[in-house]
Image: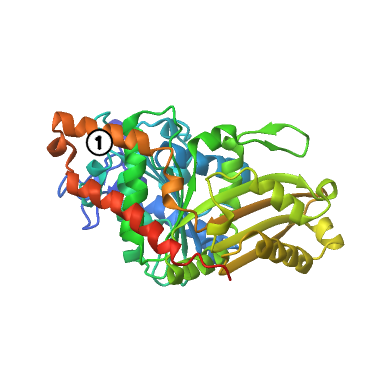
Amino acid sequence: MSGTNNRKFYTYDSFIFCPVGHKNVSGLDECASCNMPLINFRKELSTLISNLESINGEKHNKIINFGLGTFGSQILLSLKNDFGSEQLFNYLMIDYEGSNVDSLIPDNDDSLEHNSYSVDNDYDSKTNIWSNFENNFSQFDQLEDKIRRIGLNNNIDEQTAILTGSMGETLVSGMTPPLLKKIKQINPKTSRLVLTSLPATSDTDQVHFNAFCGVSRFIRNQKTSGDILVVLQGDALEKMIGIDRSGKKLGSDFLIPRMVNLLTNNSSAINSLSKIAKSLKVLAFAPVYVYGRSYEIYDNLKNILDDAAYFPLSPFQYESVILNVIIVRAPENVLNVVSKKRIEADCNLWNRKRFPSLKESLVYVLPVKETSDRLDVLLLLGGAKLQNIIQSVQPGYERFKEYIRERDLWDEFQINEDDLKKFENTITSYDKNLAKLLKPN
């Protein structure tokens, strides 16, 4: 009997099976027999049951959030920490192994492990640019599986994918266009919105180069798809300030997740905007966002909108805006005094006065149970000229292009001058096509 006491027993939990049924000891990432990725069925089943038991499971599946790179993943983590799983249910964070974001994920938080995808550190090189990711995208073989597991499904109508990331990051500028293509392949019925930031003027030329190419490649690859690009300027983010209900100053690390939260709660707005944007061939949007404006102090919504427009997160001209969406987050006690219809009417009146070339506008009012009189307002202004939007990164792009040319690094970076010329022409042709629509109504 003593031999029995020394015997090592394995339970079902001790093993993980590969897709073809080979049994492996728990802890391995790939099958020892066939090298296929291993699946922890108990963990997957637990996640599936959690999804099914969620009261708002069907609603959550309508929105899929992607956090790309350091900036995008941090935004989603802030969103999860501040609003919880009720607001962030189906999401995926994509970043390098051992990244700063990866270190913030608790070891015992299976949900975050399920909702993250790590890219090999071999791709995290100071000499890499966007082409390193685009040319190797097909090698990320487990990424599609992750995307499907977080809820993207072609059986669900009008799903919305929101991708957040800084276009200056190599991973983001390289991965965004092929990732959008992959999302469309999995579910052609998705609407796709990219919320991206550009580098600050103090960032390196290489980062500016990635951002310029990333924006241009988005426009070039998505020009007929109805995808939406919302661009935040790096310098504007550094100056972004809000005031909370207690009077405390807030920065972009607090405010940008709130913007994503407003978008996450308005899949219908993104879907409608995407359809109109596709018909008008408008892809680039300048965002305007204000947090916690007192309705009592400002007296009416038009004054709040005027104040907001003084602080855009990307440059725009009133006469160039041809399509916009306004999302207002309003406490119920304000709506008891000023009706939802009145707020919508004020938005429409403000639109007609401010934007002479406006073709279409969407207004959404989100009631919230709150006793304050403070409103949050998000505007997405379509028709902002690309040349103005990318103006801050153009000098750095030109300098880095010259650096590549002088040292003949075309092969090392897997690009050529013809590629860059096409990107530059994309910016010019987009603005020319936009100008054709700028006729006052």
In terms of depth relative to the viewer, which is nearer, 85 or 211? 211
Q: Does residue 271 appear to the left or right of 45 in the view shown?
A: right
The amino acid type of the residue labelled 1 equals Lys
The residue at the point 46 percent across, 53 percent down is: 385
Quadrant of the rendered structure where residue 102 is? top left
The residue at the point 61 percent across, 66 percent down is: 362
In terms of depth relative to the viewer, which is nearer, 283 or 294? 283
The residue at the point 80 percent across, 58 percent down is: 332
The residue at the point 55 percent across, 44 percent down is: 313
Looking at the figure, which quarter contains the N terminus?
top left
Pinpoint residue 410: horizontal percent, then vertical percent: 15, 38
In terms of depth relative to the viewer, which is nearer, 314 or 342? 314
> For the image shown, how many numbered marks are present on the structure?
1
Q: Is residue 86 visible?
A: no
Query: SS for tag 1?
Result: helix
Q: Is residue 343 above or below residue 165?
A: below
Q: Does residue 296 appear to the left or right of 125 in the view shown?
A: right
Pinpoint residue 366: horizontal percent, then vertical percent: 69, 60
Q: Which residue is mark 1?
A: 401
Q: Does residue 69 appear to the left or right of 324 in the view shown?
A: left
Pinpoint residue 418: horizontal percent, then vertical percent: 18, 49
Q: Is residue 215 above or below residue 191?
A: above
Judged from this view, the residue extending furthest toward the front is 439
Q: Does residue 29 appear to the left or right of 418 in the view shown?
A: right
